[in-house]
Amino acid sequence: MDIKNNIQYDHEKIKKYIFDIEALGRSDSALRKPLFNVLRNELLIVQKAEEATLYDALEARQRDGKLVDKLETENETIRSLLKAIKKSEPNSDEWHDNFVKLKHHVINHFDKEERKLLPKAEKALPTEEVAQSFDDKKRALWNTKTMVEEVSACEDFSKTVRQAA
């Protein structure tokens, strides 16, 4: 088990959701909404798990607190965008504009984590322990059957969108 591979896997999955939503176009608001909800849930869970395990472990070992603080601030920006998108209509300009901003922030944030944070974590932390803790935290957050069913349905839909593109 490896924290770097676990997080990169989650990042790729989230980016696929973003690209799938983008591929739907503005007219498919009925389809964008449920897929966005899955993206939102997945993103929030990964953020919370990263903060509770990886970020906290690095801060406890006093390894680059400035980078962790910056990443936590970026997570707040992403959460604010998720809230704004959720409150707006999926076919509105506001939804589209905020989604474009979200995509930009998420991709840049993931890049920073993968290029700067994860290499430091691999050197400074017991990566197997952190990976197990990360997975346990995500599992605890994904503990409702309804959420799992919703994600499964949207993952099937997401695969269909990718095949059609």
Image: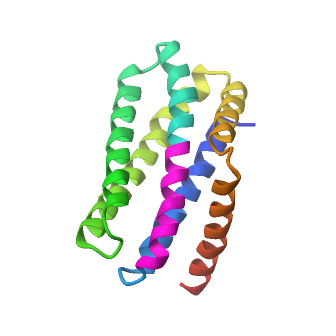
Residue 150: give x, y in percent of width and height: 63, 62
Q: What residue span does the magenta drawing correspond to?
A: 29-45
Residue 110: give x, y in percent of width and height: 46, 47
Residue furthest to the top: 61
Q: Is the magenta stretch mostly helix, strand or loop?
A: helix
In this picture, residue 89 sits left or right of residue 143: left
Task: Please tell me whether residue 144 belongs to the stretch shown in magenta.
Answer: no
Q: Residue at position x 67%, y 72% from top?
A: 156
Q: Determine which quarter of the picture holds residue 3.
A: top right
**Above or below: residue 119 compared with residue 165:** above
**Above or below: residue 23 compared with residue 125:** below
In this picture, residue 114 sits left or right of residue 130: left
**Above or below: residue 73 compared with residue 148:** above
Q: Residue at position x 62%, y 21% from top?
A: 125
Residue 111: give x, y in percent of width and height: 44, 47
The number of numbered discs placed on residues in the rendered structure image is 0
Residue 129: give x, y in percent of width and height: 71, 25
